[in-house]
Amino acid sequence: MAIEIKRSEQIGAILFLILSGIVYYLSGTFPEGQGQTGPGSYPRVVVTLIAVFALFQLARSLYAGESTVHEIRAPTIKRVGIVVALVVAYVITMPYLGFLVGTVAFLAVTIHYSGERNLRQIALVSVLVPIVLHYAFGAFLRVRLPENVLLPISRLLPPLPLVIGGIS
Amino acid sequence: MALGFVQGVIQGAALVFQPFAMLLILVGVTIGIVMGSIPGMTATMTVAVLVSFTFGMQPSEGMMLLLGIYGGALYAGSIPAILIRTPGTPSAAATIFDGFPLSENGQAGYAIGIATVASFIGGVTSIVIITFLSPEIASIALNFQSPEFFALAFFGLTIIASVSGNSVVKGMLSGLLGMLLATVGLDPMQGYPRFAFGYTALSAGLQFIAIMIGLFGIAEGLSRYAATLEQTNIEQDITGITPSFADISEIRNVTLGSSIIGTFIGSLPGAGGDIASFVTYNEAKRWVKNATPPFGDGNIQGVAAAESGNNSSTGGALVPTLTLGIPGDSVTAILIGALMVHGIRPGPRLFETEPQLVYAIFVGFFMVYVVILFAGLLGSRLWVRIISFPEQYLWPTIFVLCVVGSLALRGNLFDVWAMVAAGVMGYLLREDGYPLAPMVLGMILGPIAEENLRRSLELSDGSWLIFATSPIAATLLVLSAVSLLLPLFLNSRGEDEPTDEGA
């Protein structure tokens, strides 16, 4: 099964025109500056140019009788949709699961979804990658990574080897 | 204080020839080659995903890592181009013409060796040129005032759009969308929070690096999943890699000529390695009369022209980046973003405020190409195996790197959500034919354009004539109009150009 999107050039141009209208309106609510240089003046210049180019695209498409048809197959939509959903779920759950547990779960599920069936390899990569990144970002670069709310697993990991601390 | 040429190079070398900096060059080149060898992994994507590793480093150290990745990835794009007729990066597309026929004749190692030497010559030639030229350009640009800088930013945007192939209008829309995204947050003159809707996180603006990571990491990943992940197997033995003196003598003129042209093309904002390699390949065909074998049938001069052309564009791209603060391509846009994280704003004053850093970038980039030469000639058998790296492990790991990289910016999830949103938006835009490179450059150019436009209008009491009374600004604005209208005119006559979609 496939979904057909006809006249995508025109749809894109209309969406840009709507965006321009909204931003132009919102920019009008900003306080006035000196002369023509208030906070809203520049966004208005930008969206005016966007509107001009969108109108050009729309006119060209109408004039040329656009016949562009984007055919998107259902499996493609499903694959992309599931991957986006997995990433969104990963980000949503990270504050609760913590970086380590959340990343292990995300990698295991996504690698399996991507077609790998060797469970031992999936487990190995899913565990090793978060640990390496935990040391690289959490310990070496001092980035505060989210911690599991129930069990702070990162505290169970041994500290970064002294040699790396010395280099940094 | 600005440094003299020799003094600058010595002081820059003092920063580069440190064990940690050299290690970072080595690591950067290795990562770059590994990622560039995998079809579809662009230099832009690799630098965007890994830029967050540099936040905890000194600016010069961070630059060594990123330049290593940049050079390494651009070079390595030639390996799958030669072996499997699929460019690792868009810049290596022209390498296919003669590289793949050589591979079909069982001479893949030979083609990789030529590509390696040509990449080295292209890279170092461009760096030598820009090391001499950049301080001069910066000293001229020091006289620029607000009208000139606004005109320059506008010129940058139009030229970016004009190299967007047959979609100039879509390129402009993409660039303007980037400029619009850059307006979110405090306005630069009065500090008024624009489009924040009461959210503190939005008041601080969208983080450019997070948007970059989304546009090039997540969007690319989604495209790969849309096309289904594939695994490539390489069966050919890689032998006879090191070219002979006779080979080097044969490619010498073409390589040097292509290196000079590639440097010039790379220095044009928005014109990257892909355009440079096509132009130099076509020029080489004109230069070499009665080529044997003919171009397209496995002529090593074709490989050399394409590879020296695209690698020399990297040095060229640094010229507008460092001297004017206008990115030469998507990768240098990220380099600007990475420097800004450290509170350093590239532009003509950089040569006065951070001269040691500037020369360290030149010396470091030179060393990057020295490492590439050895890594390419000695490690090709290993790099070839990377083409077969299973994508089902690669992309989930890249998604994780995208999330952690965005989190590392300010330690808040808002940047991560902005990154994910940019990724989905980038995927949808790209599917509909909107190039993403102009959007990225628009985000960098937007604040420069705004600040200087508003300052100019304040100086002139709102009169736009201020741009006509400055000869440089007026010339740049006329050139902007030409660069915008010319491709539209050519397209209406059905002439297409190669598309610049990141290095």
Image: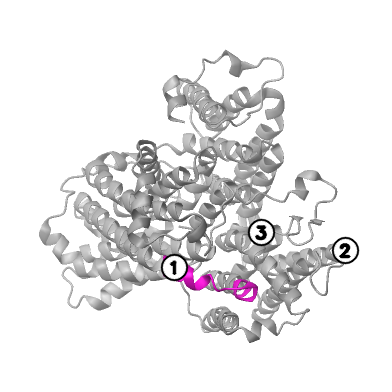
What amino acid is found at the position of numbered circle 2 in the picture?
Answer: Pro
Mark 2, secondary structure of its residue: loop
| Rendering quarter of residue B410 | top right
Q: Which residue is mark 1?
A: B267
Q: CA distance from mark 3 to mark 1?
A: 41 Å
Question: Label 3: which residue?
Answer: A4
Output the chain of dot 1: B
Please name the residue shown 24% across and 77% down the image. Answer: B287
> Which circle marks residue A31 in the picture?
2
- Relative to B434, B296 lies left or right: left
Mark identifier at residue B197: none
Residue farthest to the front, as pictured? B1
Q: Is residue B350 left or right of residue A145?
A: left
Check disc 1 and report its element: helix, strand or loop.
helix
Q: Nearer the viewer, residue A14 or B439?
A: B439
Answer whether residue B307 is visible to the viewer in this image: no
Up/down of B338 relative to B329, above or below:
above
Q: How busy is the neighbourhood of tag 1: few (under 14 within 10 Å), some, or many (20 plus)?
A: many
Mark closer to the observer (2, 3): 2
Q: Which residues are magenta?
A: B135-151
| Front tag of 1 and 2 | 2
Q: Nearer the viewer, residue B182 or A101?
A: B182
Which badge, 2 or 3, is on the more N-terminal residue?
3
Circles 1 and 2 on the same subunit: no
Instruction: Name the residue: 62% across, 41% down.
Output: B409
In terms of secondary structure, what is the magenta stretch mainly? helix
C-alpha gap between disc 1 and disc 2:
40 Å
Q: Residues within 10 Å of mark 3 (few under 14, many from 20)?
A: few
**What is the C-alpha distance between the residues marked 2 and 3?**
45 Å
